Image (cartoon, helix red, strand yellow):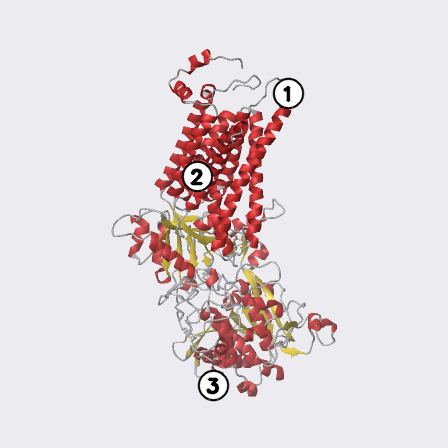
């Protein structure tokens, strides 16, 4: 009853803050941190990368790192290990992280607060996807392992290191302020005197179930002892977004006679050290936005006068993790599980990173080894000619790179692994990447100089055509014209093919600033509108889901491509769900989506309609998981570990002395009371003399 | 904080209770039963008082903190009065039960005297009250953190444990005094018990000035303990005899059939 009064005060405080289920004492001790992004564990055939915490969380005294020299305090001088090191993003470098990794008994975890950016930072490897591209020892010894050109020289490989302490990233907001306040109140060393307990500490939980490598964790996942098998890890994967200009019957797999297809490819996904923070502006968005704009530009011309060859717009997902999407497509083509096969592929044009130009040139990369074959060489030369002639009237030009240089990391390499197909990869870099932030979370809208005047509202920003958008529009125009020529289209139509800068700038805004804008809302289906957020979408490919659910990025690209290349129909909503009942519609050839449409100026109801499009999603899960070969050197074997919960909290810790004192006092009290009680109970007859009553018992 | 704080606080809070249970109650099943029944009676009183408090809080103005504070004081006073009422109810029940037990049993003498019942029921009240005060806090003391990040005092766990120990002892002493005064129809000493209970409960409003609530509470524990000692038949002479180990002679001299 007595202590309930203090407990009740806390209950009232809780209720005043409308907290329904509160444990009042826990609320006085812990402050939960909600906006955290953890570093998780990924595994492949040979390694595990990422971070791991212990199963009951890792606790450490908070230390805010001020410079690299300050690392001495947590690593050697500090008297209260283990420490939880709090860094600003400018200190998140490889040397500091490796020093902490080597002293991991004194480091309980690392927390990164994104603030200022470094001038260059790429946590990816220097030679991305070096073992799953086409340049192996057997293909060409000199070109393997980036011997000729190191594509990502700034890469420090931090994303591929393994840490045995948790690493979290906090967004810069109120929670970070609370942590800094707690640190300044309790943990600051005052002029040489030791730190006074209680100290401010943080506990991070990010226990990962999977260990060692993919084969181990897949074996453990498949042991099925109970009716609810626990998955220890899940393969990475998603969906590729594909659209033919002239669609084929989607159930007729295998070779198509007399069909020749030009594939226009781009990459969708991206990553960062903290997977959920992946931005990929220059890395992937520049490429696929250009391809989307080119697809739109080609719509009119190909519908009026369809060219002789078909064009396939392919957006591959999972390319960062050893070419998951493109390797799956090549596998499907080789095994007659796709509507065309490799014999039908005429040539490939891939759009790589195209937004950060260092001049007025864009570079055409080709594969020197396959060009030793004369047929291939002639076709590539023809493609180069088509590309170079397409820049007439535009403010840039295409330049071929040197003959002895291999292809940069691109999905085209997986096609070359299967067959020598002529192809070109467009990029803004001649040798090494111009991208200073390749696969890092700094590769965002600011990196592409997407600046909007400050007085614009979000909707006005959506419409504002930035310089980046203008330059990408030109690239898209050139690509569309080249594709049209490459597909054998009528040359007289070429100059009518123009990409729309408004579309490009709206796409750049939606993919890099805010996906919940009016245009994206108009393009999406009503049941998918929750996919749109006030932030950019995630570019991490994520875990392949069992059901037919894709991630937000895939849906956005799918519906955008549908909008830009499809035709609006007059079907009603119920007809749109079952179009086969109508005479002229067929779900074998087309997909039918019911989209929200725009809101007309004078009303509040959206004008939804049914769009008929040739866009399809194709499963992008590595063939290694289809074949069950988890140690494959041929295909991607990346999996993501599962976990139970991930959370972080801060609190004060008391000194060891106080704890031991409490225990000591407790034991002393128990001992004393045992002694006294024994004494009193044995002498009870004497101590408590009873007034004699005949009927009462004595002790 | 950690396991050491958990065990330390458990031993502090429940040390005397465990010792008393082990040495005086555990051997006799009848005493165990009455202990548990006493605990149950306390639980019923808590249920009733919390029901009333819950309803009054729901219909009150949740925003006004002065009203909430007033409601808290009202709740505390109501709970103390209900606990003492239930103690009285238990006393009446035990009197009736004792007569019934006597009629049923073959022996001529009562298996358990009213004085023992007083002690056992007081201890039962103390056990349950201590459990409700302390278990929630002990559960949170196992984690790595200690109270203080919002500026509260660090010594919450320790002072809660000491307060709980005081409460357990107090309930035991109040039980003895209460039953004794009911037997002898000393209504004024009954009133003193109730008033001292109210006093101790209201002293906790001093928290977080733990010194201000703990020190007076322990003074009251000592005083009520002395009173209970004298009510239970103790006297200074007995104590002196015990401590100077002359008790054996005393027993032989006053030997009576058991």
Label 3, label 1: how far apart the Cα atoms are: 116 Å
Quadrant position of the N terminus of chain B in the picture: top left
Tell me the residue that label 3 is attached to: A392
On what subunit does the disc labeled 2 rest? B
- Nearer to me, A503 or A124: A503
Rendered position, A230 above or below B249: below
Label 3: element kind: loop
Tell me the residue that label 2 is attached to: B163
State the image coordinates of residue A181 (x, y, percent, origin top left): 37, 57
State the image coordinates of residue A81 (x, y, percent, origin top left): 35, 47
- Nearer to me, A266 or A424: A266
State the image coordinates of residue A572 (x, y, percent, origin top left): 70, 75
Q: Is residue A345 visible?
A: no
Q: Is residue A113 visible?
A: yes
> Residue drawn 46% across and 14% down?
B251
Q: Residue furthest bottom?
A: A492
Tell me the residue that label 1 is attached to: B105
Label 1: element kind: loop
**On the picture, is A4 further left or further right than A120?**
right
């Amino acid at each position: 009853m007595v202590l309930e009064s203090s407990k009740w005060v806390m209950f009232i405080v809780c209720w005043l803050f409308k907290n329904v289920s509160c444990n009042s004492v826990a609320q006085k001790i812990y402050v939960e941190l909600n906006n955290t992004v953890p570093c998780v564990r990924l595994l492949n055939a040979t390694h595990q990368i990422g971070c791991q915490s212990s199963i009951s969380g890792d606790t450490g005294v908070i230390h805010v790192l001020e410079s690299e020299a300050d690392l001495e305090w947590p690593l050697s001088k500090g008297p209260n290990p283990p420490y939880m090191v709090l860094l600003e993003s400018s200190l998140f470098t490889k040397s500091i992280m490796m020093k902490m990794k080597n002293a991991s008994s004194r480091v309980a975890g690392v927390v990164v607060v994104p603030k200022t950016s470094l001038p260059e930072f790429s946590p990816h490897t220097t030679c991305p996807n070096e073992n799953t591209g086409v340049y192996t020892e057997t293909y060409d010894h000199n070109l393997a392992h980036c011997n000729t050109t190191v594509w990502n020289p700034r890469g420090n490989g931090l994303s591929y290191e393994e840490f045995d302490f948790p690493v979290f990233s906090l967004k810069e907001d109120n929670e970070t302020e609370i942590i800094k306040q707690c640190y300044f109140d309790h943990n600051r060393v005052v002029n040489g005197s030791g730190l006074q307990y209680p100290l401010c500490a943080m506990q991070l939980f990010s226990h990962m179930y999977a260990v060692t490598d993919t084969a181990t964790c897949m074996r453990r996942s498949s042991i099925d002892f109970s009716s609810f098998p626990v998955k220890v890890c899940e393969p990475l994967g998603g969906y590729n977004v594909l659209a033919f200009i002239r669609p084929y019957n989607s159930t007729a797999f295998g070779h198509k006679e007399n069909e020749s297809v030009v594939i226009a490819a781009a990459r969708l996904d991206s990553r960062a050290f903290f997977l959920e923070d992946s931005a990929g502006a220059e890395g992937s968005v520049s490429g696929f936005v250009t391809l989307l704009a080119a697809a739109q530009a080609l719509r009119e011309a190909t519908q009026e006068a369809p060219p002789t060859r078909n064009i396939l717009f392919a957006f591959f997902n999972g390319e960062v993790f050893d070419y998951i999407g493109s390797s799956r497509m090549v596998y499907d083509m080789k095994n007659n599980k796709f509507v065309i096969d490799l014999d039908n592929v005429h040539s490939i044009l891939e759009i790589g990173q195209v937004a950060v130009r260092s001049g007025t040139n864009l570079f055409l990369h080709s594969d020197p080894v396959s060009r030793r074959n004369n047929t291939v060489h002639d076709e590539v030369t023809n493609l180069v000619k088509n590309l170079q002639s397409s820049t007439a009237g535009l403010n840039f030009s295409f330049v071929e790179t040197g003959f002895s240089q291999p292809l940069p990391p691109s999905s085209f390499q997986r096609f070359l692994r299967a067959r020598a197909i002529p192809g070109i990869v467009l990029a803004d870099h001649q040798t090494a990447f111009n991208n200073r932030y390749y696969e890092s979370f700094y590769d965002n809208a600011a990196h592409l100089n997407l600046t909007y005047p400050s007085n614009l509202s979000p909707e006005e920003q959506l419409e504002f055509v930035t310089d980046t958008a203008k330059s990408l529009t030109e690239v898209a125009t050139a690509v569309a014209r080249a594709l049209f020529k490459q597909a054998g289209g009528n040359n007289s139509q070429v100059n009518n093919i123009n990409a729309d800068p408004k579309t490009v700038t709206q796409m750049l805004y939606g993919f890099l600033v805010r996906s919940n804008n009016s245009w994206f809302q108009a393009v999406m289906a009503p049941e998918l509108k929750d996919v749109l957020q006030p932030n950019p979408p995630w570019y991490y490919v994520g875990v392949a889901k069992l059901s037919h659910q894709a991630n937000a990025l895939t849906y956005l690209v799918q519906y955008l491509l549908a909008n830009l290349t499809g035709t609006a129909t007059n079907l009603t909503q119920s007809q749109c769900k079952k179009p086969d009942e109508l005479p002229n519609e067929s779900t074998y050839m087309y997909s039918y989506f019911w989209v929200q449409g725009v809101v007309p100026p004078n009303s509040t109801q959206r004008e939804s309609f049914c769009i008929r499009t040739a866009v399809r999603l194709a499963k992008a899960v590595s063939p290694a998981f289809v074949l069950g070969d988890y140690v494959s050197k041929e295909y991607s074997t990346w999996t993501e570990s599962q976990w139970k919960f991930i959370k972080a909290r801060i609190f004060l810790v008391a000194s060891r002395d106080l704890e031991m004192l409490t225990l000591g006092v407790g034991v002393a009290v128990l001992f004393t009371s045992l002694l006294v009680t024994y004494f009193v109970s044995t002498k009870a007859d004497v101590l408590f003399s009873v007034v004699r009553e005949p009927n009462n018992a004595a002790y | 904080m950690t396991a050491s704080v958990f065990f330390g606080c458990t031993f502090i809070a429940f040390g005397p209770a465990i010792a008393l249970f082990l040495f005086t109650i555990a051997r006799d099943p009848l005493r165990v039963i009455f202990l548990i029944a006493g605990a149950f009676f306390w639980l019923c009183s808590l249920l009733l008082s919390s029901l009333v408090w819950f309803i009054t809080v729901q219909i009150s103005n949740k925003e006004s903190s002065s009203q909430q504070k007033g409601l808290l004081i009202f709740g505390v006073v109501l709970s103390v009065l209900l606990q003492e009422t239930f103690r009285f109810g238990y006393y009446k029940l035990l009197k009736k039960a004792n007569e019934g037990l006597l009629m049923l049993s073959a022996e001529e003498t009562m298996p358990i005297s009213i004085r023992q019942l007083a002690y056992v029921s007081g201890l039962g009240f103390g056990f349950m009250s201590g459990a409700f005060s302390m278990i929630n806090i002990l559960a949170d003391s196992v984690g790595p953190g200690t109270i203080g990040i919002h500026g509260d005092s660090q010594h919450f766990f320790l002072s809660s444990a000491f307060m709980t120990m005081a409460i357990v002892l107090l309930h035991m002493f109040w039980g003895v005094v209460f039953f004794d005064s009911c037997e002898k129809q000393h209504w004024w000493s009954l009133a003193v018990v109730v008033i001292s209970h109210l006093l101790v409960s209201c002293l906790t409003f001093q928290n977080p000035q733990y010194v201000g609530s703990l020190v007076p509470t322990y003074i009251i524990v000592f005083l009520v303990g002395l009173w209970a000692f004298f009510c239970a038949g103790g006297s200074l002479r007995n104590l002196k005899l015990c401590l100077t180990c002359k008790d054996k002679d005393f027993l032989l001299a006053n030997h009576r059939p058991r």
